[in-house]
Image: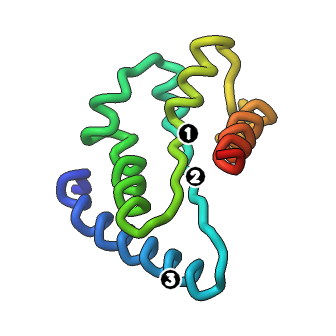
Amino acid sequence: MWTWSRARADIRIATEYVFARLARLARDAGFRLLLMMDGDRQAVYAGADPGPLYAGGALALNALAAEAAARNGIAFIDLHARFAADWQAHHKGFDFPHDSHWNERGHKIAAEAIAEFVRQ
């Protein structure tokens, strides 16, 4: 049976490997890399506390990716807090009702995060 605790080490190794390769590719090709990771939209809609989610729940992958990005000098944006703040303000979803792809609002939040990063 799959459990996060059993898979965490393997996922960490794979993430480190991929991020290190991406960082090397960016350096060799002379471009700056920005990675962005989706939030747990179902947790946002439910109003779940993100603390436990980052510790070992759905957002643990976000935390693992953020750590690997930092170790490899890759800019990283975690969208979870942005989605949560927008949901609290407007209570409008970020995905289409028939699948989990971002709708216009989801893309707007992501685009605003990228624009903010570029401005800084």
Q: Position of residue 35 (x, y in %)?
A: 57, 58
Q: Give the image quarter of residue 98.
A: top right
Q: Which of the two labelled residues, at mark 2 and mark 3, occupies the earlier sequence position? A: 3
CA separation in Å, label 1 and label 3? 25 Å
Q: Which of the two labelled residues, at mark 2 and mark 1, occupies the earlier sequence position? A: 2
CA separation in Å, label 2 and label 1? 7 Å
Mark in front: 1 vs 3: 3
Give the colour scheme shown: rainbow
Q: Position of residue 34 (x, y in %)?
A: 60, 60
Residue shown at the point (72%, 30%) measured from the top left: 97
Q: Which amino acid is tagged 1?
A: Leu
Find numbered disc 3 in the image and state the secondary structure of the residue it sits on.
Answer: helix
CA separation in Å, label 2 and label 3? 18 Å
Q: Can residue 99 be seen in the rendering of this structure?
A: no
Residue assigned mark 2 = 36
Q: Give the image quarter of residue 38.
A: top right
Which residue is nearer to you in this view: 49 or 7? 49
Residue shown at the point (22%, 65%) measured from the top left: 9
User: Across the whole image, how many numbered discs are drawn on residues?
Assistant: 3
In the image, residue 67 above or below residue 103 = below
Q: Residues within 10 Å of mark 3 (few under 14, many from 20)?
A: some
Q: Residue furthest front?
A: 120
Residue assigned mark 1 = 79
Which residue is nearer to you in this view: 6 or 21? 21
In the image, residue 62 above or below residue 94 = below
Q: Which amino acid is tagged 3?
A: Arg
Q: Residues within 10 Å of mark 1 (few under 14, many from 20)?
A: some
Q: Residues within 10 Å of mark 2 (few under 14, many from 20)?
A: some
Residue assigned mark 3 = 24
Q: Can residue 53 be seen in the rendering of this structure?
A: yes
- Are circles 1 and 3 on residues that touch, CB within 8 Å? no
- Are circles 2 and 1 on residues that touch, CB within 8 Å? yes
